[in-house]
Amino acid sequence: MASHVTVIDTSARRAVVKTTPGKYLSDVLQEACTRLGLNASQYGLKNNNKPIDLSRNIRLSGLSSGAKLELIQLSRSPSVVSVALQLPESEALGVQNGRLTDKFPSTTTLWLVLRKFETDGAGASRNLTARSLPKIEAGISGGGRLFYETPILQIVGRELSSFPDLQKTLGQLGFNSGNVMIRLSFRSTELPLEEAMSQIDQYFKALEGQETRGADAGSAGETSLSNPSRSPKPDEGQPHQSPPQTQTDVPSPQSPPSHASQASDSIVTGPMQRPISVFAPPSSTTPLAARQQHNDADYEPTVDHAKHHQTRLAASTRNKRLPTDAEIDAAESSQATKLSAVRDVEIKIRFPDQSSVVSHFSSIDTVSTLYEFAEGVMERDNEPFWLKYSGPNGEMKTIERSKGGERLIGGLGMMGRVLVNFGWDEKASLEARGPGPVLKEAYREKAREIEINDFKAVDIPETAAGGRASGEKGKEKEGGKDRKGGVPKWLKLPGKK
């Protein structure tokens, strides 16, 4: 039986997790990702190139002591899980086989599963999350005080009853696909009902308002969930957002008259009264390049390709002289002169949901300006995030927020059009790093699809491919004679003609 396992991530970092026979593999994944600084909801485990069922414990997993488990990246899109809820006898009246079934995304919490089952499509309502039981204390007359009756969930021999346990998602318990059976029961507690309601608001108020849309979307053809009277209001639990700025269409004077109305509709006023263009995420999960027809012959290497490749390999093996200090200073001076002539730069920020915002920044704009601009278009502007871009040499660089006074053009060397990638920091909440939209609703309404021109393929004649080869061959001739195999002039001995 495994007393410990070693979890290895893609960068060969290791995390040794001590285990017991009853410890579940989902808890092993959570503990390993916490040590490695990763989000456990985005990873799975495999052993000997086979995925591991995270819903099992160590005893049933068949792992040996000291087994090495590899972290694998899961799909960012939540999968569908079929959930069957076995009701107790007190709630099973009128329900076929005493069991309710529905489909949920793997990112749905257990609490939200119970709330969804409280109201079914037939209109019947049942109380599963706010039950109470009166208790009469000795020597006190009256109806007694109401104490909270907590729901108990039995999932594959695992009992979940506390509020933190009910806040776990199906994916965190190892159920990313397939079917799962949940047995429901209730247990009386010593917690008064009013205190239990305050704790419920503390744990689940914000969670219900943000994930109800995801749970309703995952149900197959079922009606949407109508919240009971005790559920929090939609406005509660959401982070306070300042009202979006008034958006006005800005005409583009440089556009032709025939496209003036199109340019006016695509440009809106963003944060800091800056004209921006908002692009919506792609409507298809398949990249556009994969849907284009192509000619297989275009990818077959020719003789010219092979010769060019051999030439590059030979050039890479030659020793090259390192530049001197004077040459390095001259190159830096030339780069500084080139950057000083740049007046503005077009920056496109791409967000995790594949939406993007494009705007122009001048030579006086700094790193702080770029971060404030990104926060102005975000719906969760209080969550930490980072920005990265491709440097002059092609390497990815992080735009550090601590260097807020550094210029975008003069300091970071941005020129022309620059793509900046947006990512959530490790300290951001799980709700922010979820699959939901990133931009504010006011900008999402103004978003438009990215227009890609369809260029037709052009057939290149075979004679054009051989033009360069014949030209190079002609250079080898001098005075109408082929010099191939001749003796060079510098090798001739004195007195020889």
Image (cartoon, rainbow, N blue to C red):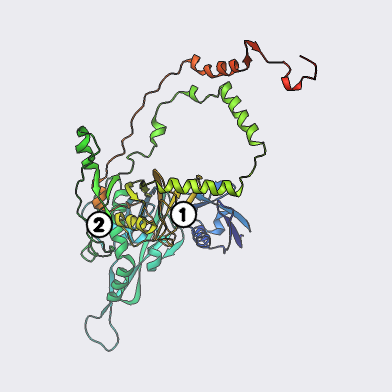
On-image quarter of the N terminus: bottom right
User: Mark 2 vs mark 1: which is more N-terminal?
Assistant: 2
What's the residue type where badge 1 is placed? Thr
Closer to the camera in the image, 404 or 485: 485
Closer to the camera in the image, 276 or 187: 276
What's the residue type where badge 2 is placed? Thr
For the question of whether residue 489 can be seen, the reply is yes
On-image quarter of the C terminus: top right
The x and y percentages for residue 186 are: 35, 67
Q: Residue furthest front?
A: 495
Task: Tell me the distance, in whole angstroms, between the alpha carbons under discs 2 and 1.
Answer: 48 Å
Element type where label 2 sits in the image: loop
In the depicted structure, whether residue 254 falls above or below residue 359: above
Residue at 41 percent across and 33 percent down: it is 289
The x and y percentages for residue 36 are: 53, 60
When asked about the image quadrant of residue 125, the answer is bottom left
Left or right: residue 246 versus residue 110 is left
Residue position for label 2: 119
Q: Residue furthest bottom?
A: 139
The crowd level at tag 1 (other Cα within 10 Å; few <14, some 14-19, many 20+) is some
Residue at 34 percent across and 50 percent down: it is 361
The x and y percentages for residue 122 are: 22, 52
- Marker count (numbered): 2
Residue position for label 1: 398
The crowd level at tag 2 (other Cα within 10 Å; few <14, some 14-19, many 20+) is some
For the question of whether residue 92 can be seen, the reply is no
Q: Verify CB contact (< 8 Å) between mark 2 and mark 1.
A: no
Element type where label 1 sits in the image: strand
Residue at 80 percent across and 19 percent down: it is 494
Left or right: residue 102 versus residue 125 is right
